[in-house]
Image: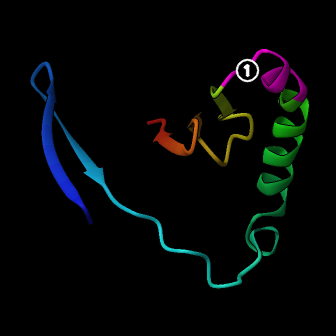
Amino acid sequence: MEAEHLLFNGALESPLFRMRVPDGDGHAVNEVAPEFANRLRKNLRALSKWLRSENIECYRLYDADLPEYAFAIDVYRDQVHVQEYA
C-alpha cells in the first residue's frame, strides 16, 4: 500500500487507501465473472465513439447495473476509481 489517510465525512470516519495494482497473473477476468466482464465491455463499446469524438478522459464506466456488483467504476484518464455502494 502506498498510503493510508483517515478522512472524515462529518463525524463518519472515511479511510482512504492509495495502492498500486500489480500486473495480472494471466488469470482471465471472464473466468471469474463473465457477466460483469461482458457488462464492462458493453459499456465501454457504447461509450468509446462518443468519448473519442468529444475528447473525454473522465467518465463513469459502470454504475451498479448488476445488483450483485454494487459499486461504481469511474475512469480518470489512466486512473480508475472503484466505489462500493452500501
In-image side of 10 versus 2 (left or right): left
Above or below 21: residue 59: above
Residue 65 in the image: state x and y as whole percent: 73, 34
Q: Which residues are magenta?
A: 49-56
* Residue at figure coordinates x 64%, y 28% from the top left: 57
Q: Which residue is mark 1?
A: 55
- Identify the coloring: rainbow
Q: Main secondary structure of the magenta part?
A: helix
Furthest residue in direction top, as rendered: 54
* Residue at figure coordinates x 61%, y 77% from the top left: 24
- Mark 1: secondary structure: loop
Above or below 53: residue 38: below
Residue 19 in the image: state x and y as whole percent: 34, 60
Does the stretch in magenta take in 53?
A: yes
**Quarter of the figure with the N terminus:** bottom left
Above or below 35: residue 14: above
Q: Nearer the viewer, residue 51 or 24?
A: 51
**Quarter of the figure with the C terminus:** top left
Indicate the quadrant where residue 28 lies: bottom right
- The type of residue carrying mark 1 is Asn
* Residue at figure coordinates x 83%, y 28% from the top left: 47
Above or below 30: residue 3: above
Q: Nearer the viewer, residue 30 or 54?
A: 54
Residue 72 in the image: state x and y as whole percent: 57, 36
Residue 14 in the image: state x and y as whole percent: 21, 37
